[in-house]
Image (cartoon, grey):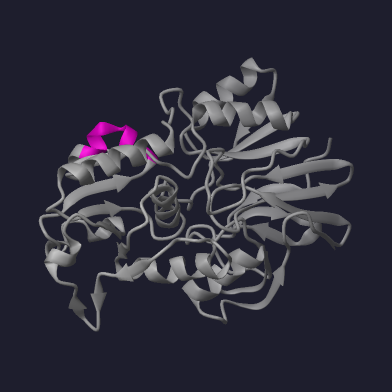
């Protein structure tokens, strides 16, 4: 097994035989992007290789000229970069998210990027692919992090709405990925009425719909700089980014009940500090049991941990007889968890 051709560098994980970087932090000649969240997908690269969905989201977020050349590499496809074979497999994190599969010198290394194992109707599920070296995140890499059934959390949200029909149910969620998943989960739970959105949610939802994700009837809270009448929003679900909580925009809603969907809502102190009345533990990252289950399914000989709570995961790897190391990459945020 030869891992000398992949190394951490200032710009990110560097693939030496391909002269490329995975999710680079600064402009490079060739960037391979796992998914379109801002901490992984940045502008200024000469060439970007990613799934079609990721490239579309990047163009919407960053403008059509975010890279000189855009190359689509979809799930199950591969291309050669010199003597290295590059492929993609679903990561289950958000729409278009991908694990990066690299085969070179009789060694397969997979960089999973951010991933989750829980069911998500808005993106393809994580696909375990056996490899020699598995590069994983550890955002929730502690045994205490065990996430509940997302539909059980949605049931709590629906019960909250039944109790407070005269108030808007304001749900804070990351605009890309989490918001669309919440909408789809509400639809799955039987809510077929209009869901109202902060303006920051509109663009990402439109892209999901363009790629065939059915989100039902969505309407903006504000049109032509005018908010909808308060009585129209009473008893309705309103989705907004976390930054909108407590803002002037939110105060226009009828006595909003503040909710937030995040894996971090399991840490009750975070919910209290943010003034959240209804914390929803819904995450787009693998929790502790799913991190361990993934290692058992992928069966790597070695594990590299990029960021998060590395120590407990490293210990668990060693208990399984796996060689493991922490890369401690910086620049990848966890607030969208």
Residue at (16, 58) in percent of width and height: 234
Vertical side of 240 occupied by 284: above or below: above
Q: Quadrant of the N terminus?
A: top right
Residue at (41, 24) in percent of width and height: 144
Residue at (45, 26) in percent of width and height: 142
Count of marks overlaid on the render: 0
Residue 288 within the magenta-colored segment of the rendering: no
Overall secondary structure of the magenta section:
helix
Q: Position of residue 15 (x, y in %)?
A: 73, 54
Residue farthest to the bottom, as pictured: 224
Along the line of sight, which residue is nearer the eye, 194 or 288? 194
Q: Is residue 284 visible?
A: yes
Along the line of sight, which residue is nearer the eye, 248 or 14? 248
- Left or right relative to 29: residue 333: left
Residue 267 within the magenta-colored segment of the rendering: yes
Vertical side of 335 occupied by 18: above or below: below
- Left or right relative to 115: residue 257: left
Dividing the picture into quarters, in which one does residue 74 lie? bottom right
Residues in magenta, as a range: 263-271
Q: Position of residue 25 (x, y in %)?
A: 54, 60
């Amino acid at each position: 097994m030869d891992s000398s051709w992949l190394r951490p560098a200032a710009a990110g994980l560097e693939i030496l035989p391909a002269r490329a970087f995975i999710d680079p932090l600064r402009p490079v000649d060739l960037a391979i992007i796992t998914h379109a969240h801002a901490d992984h997908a940045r502008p200024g690269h000469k060439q970007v290789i990613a799934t079609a969905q990721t490239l579309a989201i990047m163009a919407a977020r960053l403008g059509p000229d975010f890279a000189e050349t855009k190359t689509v590499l979809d799930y199950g496809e591969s291309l050669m970069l010199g003597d290295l074979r590059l492929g993609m497999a679903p990561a289950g994190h958000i729409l278009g998210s991908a694990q990066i599969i690299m085969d070179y010198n009789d060694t397969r290394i997979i960089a999973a990027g951010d991933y989750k194992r829980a069911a998500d109707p808005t993106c393809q599920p994580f696909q375990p692919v056996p490899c020699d070296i598995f590069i994983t995140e550890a955002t929730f890499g502690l045994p205490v992090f065990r996430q509940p059934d997302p539909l059980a959390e949605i049931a709590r949200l629906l019960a909250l709405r039944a109790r407070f029909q005269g108030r808007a149910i304001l749900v804070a969620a990351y605009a890309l990925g989490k918001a669309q998943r919440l909408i789809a989960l509400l639809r799955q739970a039987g809510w077929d009425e209009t869901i109202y959105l902060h303006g920051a949610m509109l663009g990402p939802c439109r892209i999901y719909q363009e790629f065939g994700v059915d989100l039902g009837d969505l309407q903006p809270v504000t049109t032509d700089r005018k908010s909808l009448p308060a009585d129209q929003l009473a008893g309705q679900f309103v989705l907004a980014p976390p930054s909108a909580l407590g803002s002037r925009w939110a105060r226009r809603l009828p006595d909003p009940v503040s909710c937030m969907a995040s894996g971090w809502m399991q840490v009750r102190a975070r919910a209290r500090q943010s003034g959240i009345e209804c914390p929803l533990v819904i995450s787009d990252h693998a929790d502790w049991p799913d991190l361990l289950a993934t290692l058992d399914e992928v069966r790597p000989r070695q594990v590299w941990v990029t960021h998060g709570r590395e120590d407990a995961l490293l210990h668990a790897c060693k208990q399984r007889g796996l060689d493991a190391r922490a890369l401690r990459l910086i620049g990848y945020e966890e607030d969208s968890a």
